[in-house]
Image: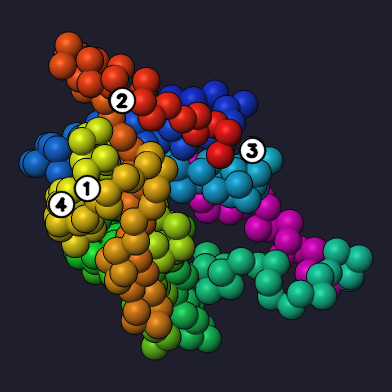
Amino acid sequence: MTRDPYEVLGVAKTASADDIKKAYRKLVKQLHPDLHPGDKKAADRFKDVSSAYEIVGDPEKRKKFDKGEIDASGAERPDQRFYREYANRGGAKQYQSNRGFADFGDFSDIFSDLFGAAGAAGATPMRGRNVHYKLEVDFLTAAKGGQQRITLPDGKQLGVNIPEGVTDGQTLRLKGLGHPGRGDAPAGDAMIEIHVRPHPTFERKGDDVVSELAVAIDEAVLGAKVEAPTVSGRVMITVPKGASSGQTLRLKGKGIKAKSGAHGDHLIRLKIVMPKAIDEELEKFMTGWRERHAYNPRQE
């Protein structure tokens, strides 16, 4: 018997959607099969957690579950199905819907319940339902593309090709990897919703990448050639003579690949960082310089 999804995730029935998501992510990180190779108990628990989140992590399914319209596996409760079938038969026309068979959910499932597997096999072919997954990828994989493996609720592993330039929230469609179809109809698709983890250095703005680069006071005053990280690797850039904090340098074509095939730019904001300790030589020099060349940048 399938356990209550709230109990599986360790949350109260009154938990917010954010609390449910946090509980799910915490359990997935603890129980992921990649961390427990060969541990059947952990794999089974991982499947239970994934199935539970599929119910209460979906606002519509959660409402139906809370109302008792579906059970913990997501299946419609027999009394609900019987009521709908009764309401759409005979003289109960006041309960009929103008949405045709939409009220029945998966009509082939009803056919199977009423007449058994043989009846379902003879039913009208019906395309399989899509399945939905969420996949977290790191910033650089999203920017440059790559492959990442995910573990499905049934324990199977699937390699997902991450296209270059994929955006946060974008959904990838893997044809034919959903639920099998009825009869000769094709299987549904696997819909992979991508979530991009923040990067400690880079930030995406459209197809551009923005980062901050620390420069020393002498590099800012005299100019310098310094090394800077980009999504494509480290490059040498020129800090202009007399650079100021907040000044932006643009590296053309070093950003994210756009749908057109062109690449955005990498924007580097300079940040002048003083030495941790001001020695006597620097202090003496700056004191003399201020006496001869004092100016107030806040008046500019």
Front in this rendered view, residue 6 or 118: 6
Name the residue nearer the viewer: 271 or 184: 271
Range covered by the magenta-colored residues: 72-90
Could you classify mark 2 by the number of other residues whose Cα lies within 10 Å: few (under 14), some (14-19), or many (20 or more)? few
> Residue placed at 65% from the left, 67% from the top?
104
Circle nearer the viewer, 4 or 3: 4
Provide the secondary structure element on which disc 3 rests.
Answer: helix
Q: Is residue 8 magenta?
A: no
User: Disc 1 marks which residue?
Assistant: 223
Q: Label 4 to label 3, Cα distance in Å? A: 63 Å
Q: Secondary structure at mark 2?
A: helix
Which residue position holds label 2? 289
Circle 3 residue: 66
Quadrant of the rendering where the N terminus is positioned: top left
Numbered circle sitting on residue 183: none
Name the spot of residue 294 as percent of width and height, x first.
42, 26
Identify the disc placed on residue 225. Answer: 4
